[in-house]
Image: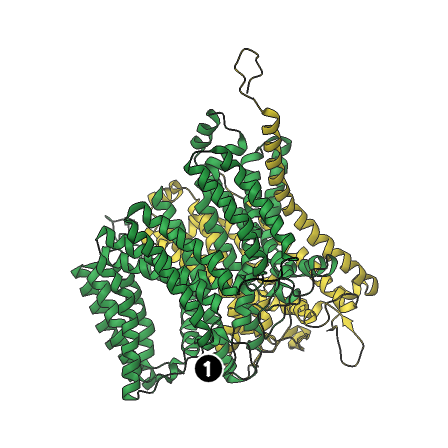
Amino acid sequence: MTDSTESPDLQRRSGLRRLKEGTYGGLFAACAAITLLTTVAIFVTLLSDAVVFFQEIPIAEFLTGTNWSPNPAGGGQAFGIIPLLIGTLVVTVTAAFIALPVGTLTAIYLSEYATPNARSILKPLLEILAGIPTVVYGYFALVYITPALKATLFPEMSTFNALSASIMVGIMTIPMVSSISEDAMSAVPDDLRQAGYGLGATKFEVSTGIVVPASISGIASSYILAISRAIGETMIVVVAMGAQARMPAVQEVAFGIPFVNPADVLLQSGMTITVAMVQIAGGDLTGGSIPYDSMFALGLTLFVVTLVMNVISDIIAQRYREEY
Amino acid sequence: MATDNANAGGFGEVSRLRGVVFEYLSLGASVAGLVALGVLLVYVTIDAFDLANASPEWLLTYFLTLVVPFLAFCLYSANDPTVTRRALGALGGGLVAVAALFTAIEAFVAQIPRLSWQLAYLFVVATPVTAYLAYVGSRGRVGAVGFGLMGRLVGGAALGLAVGTLFLVFDPLVWFLAYTLGVVPAVALYAYGARRSAPRAVAAAIPVGLVGVVVAVVLRGVVTTYPSDLIIYAWTLAVPIAIAGWRVVADRGSRAAAVAAGGVPLAVAVAGGFLAGGFGVPGPTALIVLVTVGVPTAVYVHRAIDEGDGVVGLALPVLLVGGALVGALVVEAWGVPAPDPWLDAGYVTESPSSTAIEAGLYPAIVGSVIIIALVAVLSFVLGVGTSVFLEEYMPESGVLGSLTRLLQVNIANLAAIPSVVYGLLGLGLFANLLGFGLGTAVTASLTLSLLILPITIISAQEAIRSVPDDLRRGSDAMGATRWQTTKNVVLPEAFPGILTGTILALGRAIGETAPLLMIGAATTVFSAPDSLFSRFSAMPMQIYAWANFPQAEFRYGVVAAGVITLLIILIGMNGTAILLRNRAERGN
């Protein structure tokens, strides 16, 4: 716009118009501010109740305690997060054993081998895996996977167990791994592939020896995102894993090396951080009790863990990205 | 690529085995998750419709009366001999293959629980072939007309049910007064002004409407006698829809056809509304459903006949209904043992119960619809506002540019926070601190809106970013202000993309359970919520509650029916989103 006096007056009613422009701009800014406020609100809500909780229970006791029983029948509450961390770890690691290899292979197939036609069918279908409500996955695990495993492989399995829940969490997170990894692999320039072929490499060697290393930062960040998703997953474990916070029995094999029988962890019920929160939420929710506050302490733990993992994944993706 | 050539002129041999194995391994990995999900979906469908107890005769009867005519219709529409040959080959060959495979597995390995070879054939061969033929057939002219009509019937019914559900929580009397005193005069003024080109009347429409709405809210406390609900809905909803249908037809056809397209569905709907009470269906709901189904159908039928191409397609609904009726008659006449599906009309219209036979999902469905409607409004407004701000108003560099980056990073992080933590936010902030109450529809809607906001924003940003910059520059060159450019150029161009993203995000919201658990939503309520502040249940909550029941009828029947209901609604929403996207892409 020009302020020159010779030009015709293009800005008649500019006062009203500027007010209108300003109003709309302000409204949009307010919408954007809500996203920032949400983060602040989450943090403040979690922290304010968690602080109350940590006044009652010292942080050291919370982080190192091996007993979690917020509402015991006979009194004597205990708030040790270790059993919950073990439960979360078991689910996450088992799910990762499924999601990471399958997701990576899927990404390689989609980016290197699939015809455009097959890709256009497979990609939306894979997104369906992430779109199914998690409570439905939990129901599948409880009602179909557990009986099937019990009838075939593990007759001693209990009705609520970590294994079938983890399998479902793994299947659910496949598309997270595959879509982000595939994006990274598709971004590898074709020159590198052609150079590989020029050196006499086979398609297999190009895929595993050139494309995967070149896109390793994207793959790694997809792994971290998928694991962080598995940590925060709630409904599958709530429905299928049961709610028994327990420490696995540590046996001792030769030479004093401690050893935990995987069957003891995987085939039995367990409790993750998210399950513990839901279990407390099933009771009193009006506030003011220690279990209520402990929910927020757990939420804060979860929030911090997932946030840190996202930041790490971001840093990996940014710093180690190959610029072509 | 031709690099796997063995023995290329004395360079030695390269084994292809490793590469081939790897290719098939990765292909297997790509479909492994899908196959697992597919098998689970087959089983849950079998349970929901009690197909395990369906006799082969029953399956055969309906295959002949319902599936075969439908396949024939699709083949007729496709009008392509190769498609016919391929379909018949798949159906016939699949029959033999599935039967042989099943016999082999059961003879040598083990009994497969609750899956007969007939059911396996149905799911593995018949359903995919039918879907393929429906896809191919819908591209033919006849099929396009038929499927278009079916789409309007189904979509109209879904929309009518949703609108009827929403009116459960709003005060229809306020709506009646606001409509009569505000909306009608405003629209009348606008129409008059537009027709006589009197800009003053057009300008007065909005103030008049606002005054009317305010007056209506005031009068609500004063006026004591009102017409019956049925008349209110007929006047406030059915009449405008009928007028819209009349207008659409009048634009392109004769006056008599226009009156028929608007008037006949209106008359049928009003009559249906009065008669519905006799069948135990609420009159207003019947009226709304009939009019939202009838008017688009009538308009569509008029257009199909007007164009005179593919009119045969209009017979598709008749074909399907007729097939179902004939099938039912045959089953009845020969006394073929029929399965007793868990998912039936009673299931979606009745309240939960402690006995599996009587249990229903109705209050939970109503709860879900109400929450999703509120979430849709909130997340759409906030999402579009934020993305417009980030894309159109904020610079990408400088001090403000770093603020933009901060907002972007923040949104990306919000998208990754577990949903259960959002539940804690809803519990601490909305339910307890702001006092919206534990487990009320308002608390749930606010929580879920914040939960899906990042997804909405990210997809809306992509839609806005894909608007070509030339259009913006063109608008700027005409002297438009930033808001005018946004309103007249960017938003209309990006609208289909924004809508698609919002619907997909809403699909996420409708299945969320963990936040609802945290804000204390009821797992089971026995009557539908009647205000925004009453306790409610939602479909996933009810599924969660029932999944904990130990009885087999619940685990393998009632919950399966709930899961199928939820998935059907999800497929409907996602299908709508994909249709919108495809239409927008074709339009460009």
Can residue B7 be seen by looking at this rendering?
A: yes
Name the residue beneath numbered marker 1. A152
**Vertical comparison of B161 with A109: above or below:** below
Q: Please tell me in which quadrant of the rendered image residue B80 appears.
A: bottom left
Location of the C terminus of chain B (image quadrant): top left
Q: Which residue shows up at 49% across the image and 70% down it?
A: B282
Q: Is residue B103 visible?
A: no
Q: How many marks?
A: 1
Which color was chain B given? green
Q: Residue furthest top?
A: A6
Based on the displayed image, in which of its 4 quarters is residue B327 positioned? bottom left
* x and y, in percent, of residue B58 in the image: 30, 82
Mark 1: few, some, or many residues within 10 Å (few <14, many ≥20)?
Answer: few
Query: Label 1 sits on what residue type?
Result: Thr
Q: Position of residue A13 (x, y in %)?
A: 58, 24
Q: Which one is nearer the viewer's eye here, B162 or B268?
A: B268
Q: Position of residue A117 (x, y in %)?
A: 32, 53
B435 lies left or right of B311: right
Which chain's residue wears label 1?
A
Q: Helix, strand, or loop for circle 1?
A: helix
Residue that lies at the very extreme toward the left in this rendered image: B81
Q: Position of residue B142 (x, y in %)?
A: 23, 58
Front one among B430 and B302? B302
Which coloring applies here? by chain
**Chain ID, yellow in image:** A
Q: Could you say which is closer to the camera, residue B567 or residue A318?
A: B567
Asked if B251 appears above or below B281 in the picture, the reply is: above
- Identify the residue at image location x=32%, y=45%: B251
> Which residue is at a point 44% across and 64% down the rendered structure image?
B287
Q: Residue furthest bottom?
A: B335
Instruction: Looking at the picture, tell me which residue is in the foreground, A56 or A7.
Output: A7
